[in-house]
Amino acid sequence: MREDCGMTKIDMTNALRLPAGSVDLAAFDPRATPGLPEGEGKEDGYKRLAELDAELSDLQERLFAAGRSNPASAPRILLVLQGMDTSGKGGVIRKAVGLVDPQGVQITAFKAPTAEERQHDFLWRIRRALPKPGMIGIFDRSQYEDVLVARVEGLVEPEVWQSRYEQINAFEQESAESGITIIKCFLHVSRDEQAERLQERLDDPAKHWKYSPGDLITRAHWDQYQAAYRDVLERCNTEVAPWFVVPADRKWYRNWAVAQLLLEHLRSLKLEWPEADFDVTEQKELLKRLS
Amino acid sequence: MREDCGMTKIDMTNALRLPAGSVDLAAFDPRATPGLPEGEGKEDGYKRLAELDAELSDLQERLFAAGRSNPASAPRILLVLQGMDTSGKGGVIRKAVGLVDPQGVQITAFKAPTAEERQHDFLWRIRRALPKPGMIGIFDRSQYEDVLVARVEGLVEPEVWQSRYEQINAFEQESAESGITIIKCFLHVSRDEQAERLQERLDDPAKHWKYSPGDLITRAHWDQYQAAYRDVLERCNTEVAPWFVVPADRKWYRNWAVAQLLLEHLRSLKLEWPEADFDVTEQKELLKRLS
């Protein structure tokens, strides 16, 4: 099995990359497992997730090292997680992001804006949360809420949210030019699977805290949210900040897929260990004298 | 083996708790393994670390849930990590803290104060980094640097650092009263082991980024730092914010010991899952109608 795994070339980036152009969300099966070799299932998914840990940790440490040694030129990564309630943003952070050293991760969960945040442009709080050099930033929800919940719940006038797609594209372009690799994941859960997960949260007292009556109000607007997501995916899918549609009905697949995406993007940075900015031989001598 | 583990009662809190009174650091063996049952070694340490993961994750989730549901009354935990260079503050965060959901952890690494930080009292930046309700805060270095490096390197006048012990005690008392459980760990590494670890960093190009010529300057002041640590341990070892002396020459022991300490402190909070603040039966009905 291990030998088979090693020989099968996984390319999650291509498997999940949303093509440019018009989007029909109904064409994406939330139970599909793109990128997983034919015939593989849940156990293989767990195994693959466990197997990528070592390389992911190594590459993340190289990224972190670059941030320490050359902050001005060090790359940064931003993983944006969007999806309907129960699609598993928290699960991905726990199971996939949780594989890497927590010192190299900056997680921001965007809730309803605070009084202070509302006094600024909608991108103000987003900019402040961008990852520092050498860090992997994780957005649990993001700037996209301002064209999703803001639109569906009518929190702002249509002219306002309509102008935001271009603002977001400009912002992401600017962020990419400043050295941030942007990976945007839409966790695509089905309406039926959401019902099951909400039911689980209601049935299990240990999960009540995750439930809010507001979840049902959002669920009642399912179609409007899907339409809003379709526009997001169509209008903000650029070369520098592409969308990946991650089928999310199978948790094991979803977690592995996002971890694999992160790994492939880290690989593409071709990170080397930073060169010493001191004289190694001299320091060895000094250490000997001090021992 | 598993059965033996289950039967041996581990009490790391008592094993590592520094008694009140005068401190003689030379009396603590950095290679000792207090709290580990007689006859156990490295493999048992790894095993025990892996075995506490499930309970640690469960308790951390309860803590996080409390923070979400009742922020005003939710407990908070602060783990302070201090120790000489190479004592393993980063290793503990990666291997022990890394076991829990990164969403529930707030890590702050305190470096030399910035220009802005220097314009404030030394505790200003510390207060700002205190964990939010339901969170586990991790301090990689802390307020104690202001009576360690500040003292040894003469960054401030003696009157200034001498007055800080009482200020720190008052601050910690106040923090504890606000609901923060404070766990302070001194990672106790020997001078010889530090030499080996610095040598490793010099020998391995993948570790050069962790090395700084400043490390040798600090090493040259070893005895002064040990004296400064002794005063910290003697003067700031209170009931509400006790010190734990963690032998740190064996990495496997050090990581397990800190994870176990964290676990025992989480247990002592006796965390229950929050009660639903909505009518569960009513929500189940509503969900059925919306399915």
Image (tube, coloured by chain):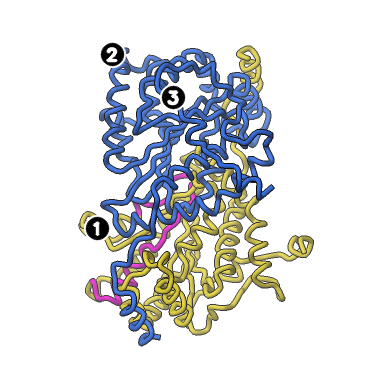
Chain colours: A yellow, B blue
Q: Name the residue under label 3.
A: B19
Q: In which quarter of the image is the N terminus of chain A?
A: bottom right
Residue A225's mark?
none
Residue B266 placement (x, y as % from top left): 43, 46
Residue nearer the viewer, B173 or B157: B173
> Mark 2: which amino acid?
Glu
Could you tell me which residue is drawn at 65 percent across and 46 percent down? B4
Q: Name the residue under label 2.
A: B159
Residue nearer the viewer, B150 or A24: B150
Q: Which chain carries label 3?
A: B
Is B211 magenta? The answer is: no
Could you tell me which residue is drawn at 54 percent across and 16 percent down? B26
Q: Mark 2 lies on which chain?
A: B
Q: Which chain carries label 1?
A: A
Alpha-carbon neighbours of circle 2 within 10 Å: few (<14), some, or many (≥20)? Answer: few
Marks 2, 3: nearer the viewer = 3
Marks 3, 1: nearer the viewer = 3
Asked if both marks, 2 and 3, belong to the same chain, the answer given is: yes
Q: Quadrant of residue A160?
A: bottom left
